[in-house]
Amino acid sequence: MYLNHITLSTGHLARTSRADVTDDTVKALKPWLQAALDYVDPYPLPGPLGVRDGFVMSASTQDGALICHVGHVEAGPLVTFGVAARSRQSGELWAWLAAQYGSADALVAPSVPWCAVALHAGFMQQAGAAAWIGDFERCVAWTWLERP
């Protein structure tokens, strides 16, 4: 199985396999993701990204799909991403993301499963975020896709 990882503003699409994310990473992220979903306020990212560097995430579900808002406590929102595991989640989530954050002209949802990402203004202002945030999105997406 592959995950289609797409950036809404550019249409850049990368296909990643589950083998790109270690079992240990998914195992570590499962309780963290559940805690982020259960927590009302933005939840610190795991490890030094949250504790030392001040990155946070808010997570919620919409009809079985995952929606995440990643930001920095001082710099504000960086990205929003949605994960659709099944085709019945895809249309509504894609429409919502495109309506909220825009998308490249004529961009359509890829086949499921997918992770669609909207970049916010703070993303370009937060030096170094580009080096890790795409991998983080994919790790969270695969963790979500493997939930019971």
Image (cartoon, helix red, strand yellow):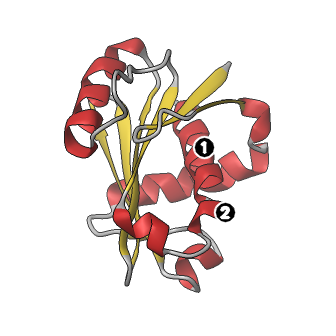
x, y percentage for residue 35? 43, 59
- Height in image: 133 above or below 146? below
Residue 129: image location, x then y, percent: 57, 67
Amino acid type shown at disc 1: Arg
The kind of residue tagged 2 is: Ala
Find the residue positioned furthest to the front: 105
Residue 18 is tagged as: none
Where is residue 18? Give x, y as percent.
72, 31
Q: Secondary structure at mark 1?
A: helix
Q: Quadrant of the N terminus?
A: top right
Q: Is residue 133 left or right of residue 125?
A: right
Residue drawn at x 21%, y 43% is 100
Residue density around tag 1, few if under 14, some if 14–19, many if 20 or more, within 10 Å: many
**80 or 85, which is in the foreground?**
80
Q: Is residue 143 above or below residue 73?
A: above
- Residue 22 is left or right of residue 124, and the answer is right
Q: Residue at x 36, y 64 (%)?
A: 121
Counting residues from the start of the chain, the first of labels 1 and 2 encountered is 2
Quick check: 60 left or right of 129? left
Residue 18 left/right relative to 148: right
Q: Which residue is mark 2?
A: 131
Q: Find residue 20 and report its horizontal and vertical position in percent.
A: 77, 38
Task: Residue 67: name its quadrant.
Answer: top left
- Density class for disc 2 (Cα within 10 Å; few <14, some 14-19, many ≥20) is few
In the image, what residue occupies the spot 60% across and 51% down? 134
Q: CA distance from mark 1 to mark 2?
A: 13 Å
Name which residue lies at 71% across and 51% down. 25
Q: Nearer the viewer, residue 122 or 66?
A: 122
Location of mark 1 (residue): 138
- Image vertical order of residue 32 relative to residue 99, above or below: below
Disc 2, SS: helix
Mark 1 or mark 2, which is nearer to you?
Answer: 2
